[in-house]
Amino acid sequence: MILSAIVAVSDNDVMAKDGKIPWFVRGEQLIFKRLTTGPPIIMGRKTFETPKTLKDKPMLLPDRLNIVISRNKNYKVPEGGVVVNSFDEALALPAVKSASEAFVIGGSEIFEQAMPKIYKLYLTRVHTTIADGDKFFKFNPGEWKLTHKEFYKKNEVPDRPYDFEFQIWQRRP
């Protein structure tokens, strides 16, 4: 199983502000959906609870196994999702072990725990600076090899107020 991380960050490495992604960039979400539909996704409780419906209630992302890490042993997610109490417990699930690839999708605490085990990093660099961001994603490019990049111009389509670059990094041996 290849363990991958997928994350979007600003030019100053911000991935969240006040518990929310601080941008909406058409195309970036489509990349996320294309890559993560099918394989298991692993996330922390706060990432799961980021509002995903008009009713402001968390919901599972469709067409993939949603694994939520929570320290609360009584935490519940909707039917079809799985709650575990640690990152290692998530990795030990048969659905993860048998997958060709599994994705870590956040948040910051889960990324910190996962990074030593991540083999592939799907990074979207949104070309803006976010003041007062409170969640950051840092990685050492010297430990990784850039294997792919695509540039997307702002305003090519509606709802794309920023240029962004999609990159794929692979951990160096």
Image (tube, rainbow, N blue to C red):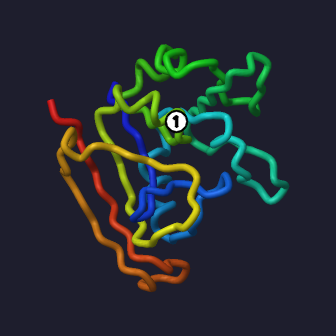
Q: Residue at x 39, y 65 (%)?
A: 11
- Judge from the rendering whether residue 137 lies leftward or rightward of residue 107; answer left or right: left
Q: Residue at x 59, y 64 (%)?
A: 22
Report the label total.
Answer: 1
- Judge from the rendering whether residue 68 lies leftward or rightward of residue 89; answer left or right: right
- On the image, the x and y values in percent for residue 168 come to 28, 51
Q: In the rendered image, which quarter is residue 53 located in?
A: bottom right
- Identity, as a three-letter code, of the amino acid under mark 1: Ile
- On the image, the x and y values in percent for residue 131 come to 55, 67
Q: In the rendered image, which quarter is residue 154 located in?
A: bottom left
- On the image, the x and y values in percent for residue 78 come to 76, 33
Question: Which residue of the protein is positioned furthest toward the right in this rendering?
Answer: 55
* Quadrant location, the C terminus: top left
- On the image, the x and y values in percent for residue 121 come to 33, 44
Work out whether 31 lies above or below 43: below
Question: Which residue of the protein is positioned furthest toward the left in this rendering?
Answer: 173
Q: 47 and 113: which one is in front?
A: 113
The residue tagged with tag 1: helix, strand or loop?
strand
Work out whether 83 lies above or below 138: above
Residue located beneath label 1 in the image: 41
Q: Residue at x 69, y 49 (%)?
A: 50
Work out whether 105 lies above or below 10: above
Task: Specify few, some or many for label 1: CA neighbours under 10 Å numbering under 14, 14-19, or 20 or more.
Answer: many
